Amino acid sequence: MILVGTAGWADRDLIASGWYPASVNSPAGRLAHYAGRFPLVEIDSSYYAIPAERTVRGWAENSSGLVLDAKAYSLLTGQRTRLTSLPTRLRPLAQSDWITAERASPALLDATWAYFHACFEPLRQTGRLGRVLLQFPRTYVFGTRGLRLVADALERCRPLQAAVEWRHPSWFEPENRDRGLSLLREYDAAFVCVDMPQSHPDSVPPLLEVTSDTAVIRLHGHSPAWVGGSKEDRYRYEYTPAELAEWASRARLLAKEAGDVHVVVNTCCAGAAQQAATRLLDLLDAR
C-alpha cells in the first residue's frame, strides 16, 4: 500500500487556515477529522519533547485506522537539545543546559530511550505505530564514528521499527552508499528518500532505495530560503501538479519492492501540506 499524509495535524497555521471546519475545535476532534481524510500522519511534536503517555493514548483512541509515524526526540538522534525539553524527572541526570547524545551520560541516554519507548506503548499496542523517524544531523558524517552512532540509535530503537533520514551528503557518495544502506538492512530500518533543495553544499539527493518492508518518502519542498531562513520560510512551499505527479510515479516504483510506502508531505503554512497530500492521493487513486 502507498500511504500518504503530512507531518503534523495541529500546527497553528493549519488551524487558522480554515482547513478544519469551525465545528472541529478540539484536539481530539481535529485528529479524528484528519484520520477521516488521510491514512498516515507523522507525529512531529515528539522531536521537540517526548509526549506524555496519556497524550499518546488519546492519539490511539481518536485516530481509528490511521497509521502514525513518530519523529524521534532530538536527543536520541544526536541533535543539540535544550535541558528544559527533557521530561522533568530526567533533568537531574543532565549536566548542562544544552546536551547531545555523545555528551550525555549513559544514565541519561538510557533513561530517555526508556521513557520514549514507554510513552509510545499505548499506540504500539494498537498495531498502528508506523516507523520511528531517526533524523540524523549534518554532524553525523559517514565514517567510523557516524556508522557507530547510527547503529547505536538503531539498536536502542528496537523493537520499534525505524526509518533513517541522513542530512549529510557523505552518506550518498558512491563509495559510501552501499555500506550505509547495508547497515539499515541489518536493522530492518527504512531508508528515507528526501525531496529538498539541491542548491547548497549539504543537499542530499532524492535517492530511491528499499532497505526494509517499508519505504519512506519525505517531501520538504524547494524553498529558496532553505539556507538562512526561519523554520517557516525553509518549509514554505507549494508543490506543483507536475512535481506531485512525478512523486506519485516514484512512490509506485518503490511499491514494486516494498510492502508499504509512506509518503509524508513536510511543507508548512496555511494547509499547503494537506492540499498537496490530497492531490497525491487523487493521483495515486487514478492508476
Image (spheres, rainbow, N blue to C red):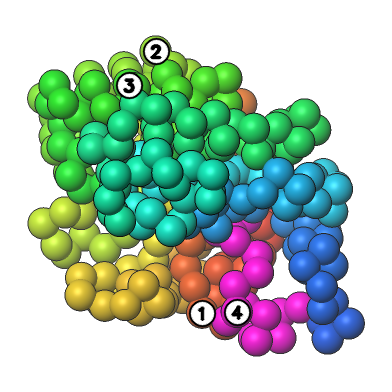
What kind of residue is marked 3?
Ala
CA–CA distance between discs 3 and 4? Answer: 36 Å
Residue 12, numbered circle = 4
What kind of residue is marked 4?
Arg
Residue 108 placement (x, y as % from top left): 40, 34
Q: Nearer the viewer, residue 81 or 258?
A: 81
Observer-side mark, 3 or 1, equals: 3
Q: In the rendered structure, which disc, 2 or 3, sits on the residue that comes first in sequence?
A: 3
What kind of residue is marked 2?
Glu
Q: Which residues make up the magenta segment?
A: 1-20
Q: Furthest-front residue in view?
A: 92
Observer-side mark, 2 or 4, equals: 4
What kind of residue is marked 1?
Cys
Cβ atoms under marks 2 and 3 closer than 8 Å: no
For disc 2, the marked residue is 186
Mark 1, residues whose alpha carbon is within 10 Å: few (<14), some, or many (≥20)?
A: many
CA–CA distance between discs 2 and 4? Answer: 39 Å
Residue 206 placement (x, y as % from top left): 32, 47
Cβ atoms under marks 2 and 4 closer than 8 Å: no
Q: In the rendered structure, which disc, 4 or 1, sits on the residue that comes first in sequence?
A: 4
For disc 1, the marked residue is 269
Q: In the rendered structure, which disc, 3 or 4, sits on the residue that comes first in sequence?
A: 4
Residue 38 placement (x, y as % from top left): 73, 56
